[in-house]
Amino acid sequence: MKYLRSVRGRMLGIAFVPGVALVVVALVIAAFLIHQADRTREQATETAAAADRTARAVVSLQAQRGEAMATPDHRASAYAIFTQRIDTTIAGLRDYARRAPDAESAYQQTTAVDLLCVAEGMYRADSLALAGLDSVTRRSFTTAVAAYRAQLAQVSGQLTETGREAYESITRSAEWSQLAAVEDALVAGEPLPIPESTWRSAAYTVSQQLGVLYSRQSQYAVQLTLDDGRRTLAGALAASTAILLSAVLLLVVVRRLVARVPVPVVPIMVPTVRTAIPRPRHTRSPEPRAPEPWPKKAVFEDLRRR
């Protein structure tokens, strides 16, 4: 007689399967979320490096543009060439902003790129005014001034509370008013309302303030992406730990429940197999014979008794 496994062993075996499945699910989720967190951190690092490279490239191109525009004969062409190169450089940074891991990070990084465009717009208008305006460059100057003012007013609504305060500090400053007065006079072809030294000092101060505003916004956008990566990593570890604990709890509960269940033993009857007696190959099995009839003497004896 042989015996099947006990009911306790079968129940533990059945509970082991979902427990292992939960552990596998926890590991898969953890690996996926950790990969996402690592990818988010890499994107934030790449965006920060791209922002730094772009800012350095823009400053370098602005200096080259100022030197090239010193020649009156090539002033318009130099302005157009270097302005196009700067726009292309900034467009590359905008591509990084579009590849942000989430909508909020992309929004803040795009706002930072817009502020960089504002700072460049102010600087290109100032370079035109400093090089001297003629009938051709005055139109470019007017377009540049109108563009950067309108873009700054538009971007101001997208800034954080701190950025909004910095924007209001810039636009309400005396340097901003002085620069705006000079720009309006140059657009109208009128004499400067303030001394040139005051104008240059105001232009430098406003340019520095716009640069700082862009830097703060860019750092905020990068930090936002890094924080998103940290949250993703923390969520991965929390989710994996919760699933692992659920698997362990399941096994413990099932083990306790199984311990209270009696352990019946189910027997099974194994039929005995008789060993066949081998026969010689040359031996024939006897043919069955017909039953013998009753003997007559026995019949007569039975009749006599009756």
Image (spheres, rainbow, N blue to C red):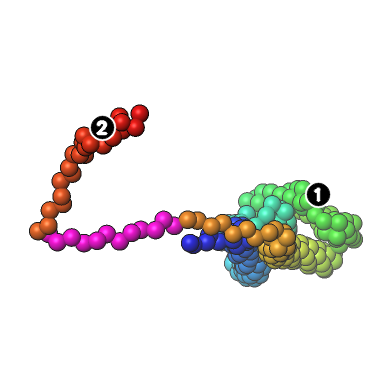
The CA span between labels 1 and 2 is 135 Å
At 79% from the left and 63% from the top, the residue drawn is 213
Q: What are the residue bounds of the magenta stretch? A: 270-281
Which part of the image, by quadrant, shows the C terminus? Answer: top left
Task: Point out residue 78 in the picture as x, y percentages from the top left corner.
Answer: 57, 61
Magenta stretch: includes residue 275: yes
Q: Residue at x 71, y 63 (%)?
A: 259
- The residue carrying mark 2 is 300
For the residue marked with disc 1, what is the amino acid? Gly
Q: How crowded is mark 2: few (under 14 residues within 10 Å), some or many (20 or more)?
A: few
Does the image show residue 241?
A: yes
Q: Which residue lies furthest to the front in this view?
A: 304
Q: Can residue 114 be seen in this view?
A: no
Q: Quadrant of residue 129?
A: bottom right
Q: Does the magenta stretch include residue 148?
A: no
Quarter of the rendering containing residue 91: bottom right
Q: Disc count in the image?
A: 2
Q: Percent from the top left, x then y, of residue 85?
A: 57, 61
Q: In this view, does 73 lie to the left or right of 236?
A: left
Question: Which sits in the foreground, 208 or 113?
Answer: 113
Q: Mark 1 points at which residue?
A: 157
Task: Give the label, 1 or 2, closer to the camera.
Answer: 2
Judging depth in this view, the residue of 32 and 253 nearest the camera is 253
**Type of the residue with mark 2:** Phe
- Earlier along the polypeptide chain: callout 1 or callout 2? 1
Q: What's the residue at 31%, 31% (across, down)?
A: 304
